[in-house]
Image (spheres, rainbow, N blue to C red):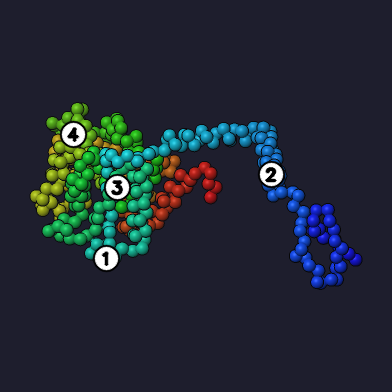
Amino acid sequence: MQRTGMLDAGSKETVDPMDLTSDYDNYTYDTSVSSLDYSKMLKGRNAFRLKGGFQKVKSFIQEHKFVRYVLFLIPLFVFAYLITYPSHKDNSPSKIVMILAVNEGGGVERWKTPQEWSVERSSIANKKAYAQRHGYTLTLKDTSLKRRYSHEWREGWEKVDILRQTMREYPDAEWFWWLDTYTFIMEPELSLESYLLEDINKKAYRSVEHFNPLGIKTDVPYVNTLDQPIDMILAQDCGGFNLGSFLIRRSEWTDLLLDAWWDPVLYEQMHMVWEHKEQDCLEVLYSQQPWIRERLGFVPLKAINSFPDGACEDQKDDKRYFYSKKDRDFIVNMAGCNFGDRSCWDEYENFRNLKAELHRPWYKLW
């Protein structure tokens, strides 16, 4: 049996297959087809395949109208997203400052539990995301018991002191929004301007006669609310004024209010009588000082302070107080969740999961 190998183009040599001494190193192969021609052939073949693929895609699109609609809508969605998504890359100072009360370290009475740490982290993340989305400033203020004041009972009255400090810290800000730790923003797409501050005179009521759980006297002389702007916005719950979430605007009226609210004479005489501290003090000032009524506006509790089930137990059937999934209330305040049989962590996790459910993107199925 014999086989042939190519030495030169057109020449052949007979080789014995059993001859192990054959010199294969002398073989030269046919190079009549150059590497350049071969690469051109490959490019042509790839171009043919690519052209055929385009033809198949084109035919598929022409045969299916739904695909054409999708391809037409995708650029529109992208364009709408780019023009509607808020952009706050400018370095201009924010006109709204969010003040979040936190308890860093747990104070001097006891260590914080893991559940309390978890709630605080979730609360900070919730407010931080909202502030970044709308271009607001978020500042964290420590309200733990650290004996910062000369009088041991002064702790718990720090809201006024912190407000004054924050106003000095942010001189260009106009509105300041106080938020307790156990608050949670449920509808982050709503900005404070569009939701509340724009046309606030039409959204707030200026007298407690519409809702008066404390029975405060409403007919007070020398009160003019017709020509006065609103410089403080708060709500009332079943126990009176609610300071878990409220807004206050920088003005001369605000400076006078904070001075009167922080008056050491009032504090020294009444701190053992006023169980709710700053809240009771503001209620007394409102009931006795006509000038305070002129620029204070009230909104419904569900507007900035919706309660979870378990709060206001004596009026648990009153829908004016409690969060409604159907109404999609703006913010929930789990006030008093650390008393009785309630659990702050359970309530916070419940609303955090509910928010994720309500705002799950349409393209996510899990």
Counting residues from the N terminus, which is met first, the one under dot 1 or under dot 2?
2
The residue sitting at 53% across, 46% down in the picture is: 364
Relative horizontal placement of residue 269, taking residue 189 as reference (left or right): left
Circle nearer the viewer, 2 or 4: 2
Cβ atoms under marks 4 and 1 closer than 8 Å: no
As rendered, which of 50 and 6 lies closer to the eye?
6
The residue sitting at 74% across, 52% down in the picture is: 31
Q: Vertical placement of 131 versus 9: above or below?
A: above
Disc 1 secondary structure class: loop
Residue 212 visible in image: no
Counting residues from the N terminus, which is met first, the one under dot 4 or under dot 1?
1
What residue would you read off at disc 1?
A: 110
What residue would you read off at disc 3?
A: 138
Counting residues from the N terminus, which is met first, the one under dot 3 or under dot 2?
2
Residue 341: image location, x then y, percent: 36, 59
Disc 3 secondary structure class: strand
Counting residues from the N terminus, which is met first, the one under dot 2 or under dot 4?
2
As rendered, which of 250 and 84 lies closer to the eye?
84
The residue sitting at 14% across, 48% down in the picture is: 262
Q: Residues within 10 Å of mark 2 (few under 14, many from 20)?
A: few
Give me the disc on residue 40.
2
What residue would you read off at disc 4?
A: 294
